[in-house]
Image: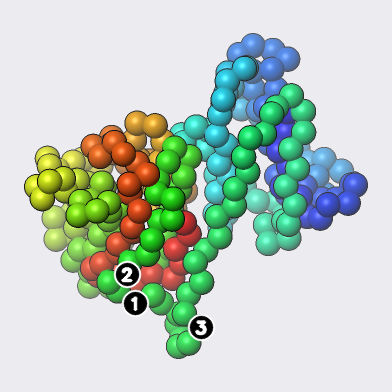
Amino acid sequence: FHVNLQCGSRQGADVAFHFNPRFDSLPGYVVANTFQGSRWGSEERKYEAPFPQGSNFSLTIIVNTDAFTVLANGMKFMEYKHRLNFSQVDTITVDGGVVVTCISFQNPVSAPVYGAPQYYTIPYKTAINGGMYPGRSITIQGVVNPSAKRFHFNLCYGSGIAMHFNPRFDENTVVRNSLMNNKWGPEERQGGMPFERGQPFTVTFICNDQTYLVMLNGVQMFTYKHRHLLLQDVNMLEVNGDVSLTSVTI
């Protein structure tokens, strides 16, 4: 089967990204390509099957500045560098040996229309309507303050925090934790400090059955196992600290 991100809906329209799992040889593989000016480009092949035949699956395509990032069941599967301007994509087509049960699109929350540059007010809170669930992602874009010491992103429920993601420049690490029953659990600190003071970033939190995956600038950096298991209760995002926000996508 295939998924096409197209520049228009007419027959023969350019295809910015053609994602084509094939099972004509075991264990299966994926062909990725671009169709431009009535011609296919050079194929990129990955000899790995993202989904077993006959299985339910979730496919997430994240648009980054340089490439599409493809997640299969919440796990990073591949990247495909842009060959066409992704802003021209306005149509998605799905065809072949697949049954589609749901397609959803996540658009950036609008930034304030006044002032320049346009940043969100910190501390920042916004609802996660419907809560978290496997396959859901939250993407946050911003800039680390030049003299930053700490900032954090919290995925909250009720009076608790399902995931506390806390870059600490004063300790050169990123702390992950949960606040449950008014008590902090054991900290997770491995993985170093991938953020840089004064630099822009894109962080994506991806929920799957067992964990939250954290991607930074399109690269998976951390995995955090669920401690609060009622994912749909997680209905609030909080951001605070030495950071400026430019975009939030829920």
Identify the colour scheme used: rainbow
Is residue 62 in sight in this rendering? yes
> On the rendered structure, is 228 left or right of 45?
left
Query: Considering depth in this image, is 111 or 218 the residue closer to the camera?
Result: 111
- Determine whether 2 is above or below 160 in the image: above
Which residue is located at x 23 percent, y 37 percent? 227
Residue 123 left/right relative to 177 = right
Instruction: Tell me if mark 1 has few (under 14), some (14-19) or many (20+) residues whose alpha carbon lies within 10 angstroms of its own.
Output: some
Q: Is residue 77 visible?
A: no
Q: Which residue is mark 1?
A: 121
Identify the residue under disc 3.
Answer: 113
Q: Nearer the viewer, residue 207 or 7?
A: 207
As shown in the figure, which amino acid type bears the numbered disc 1?
A: Thr
Q: Residue at x 44, y 50 (%)?
A: 130
Q: CA distance from mark 1 to mark 2?
A: 6 Å
Indicate the quadrant containing the N terminus: top left, top right, bottom left or bottom right: top right
Q: Residue furthest bottom?
A: 115
Res. 44 mark: none
How far from the left and from the top, in percent, is residue 230?
31, 39
- Mark 2 highlights which residue? 124
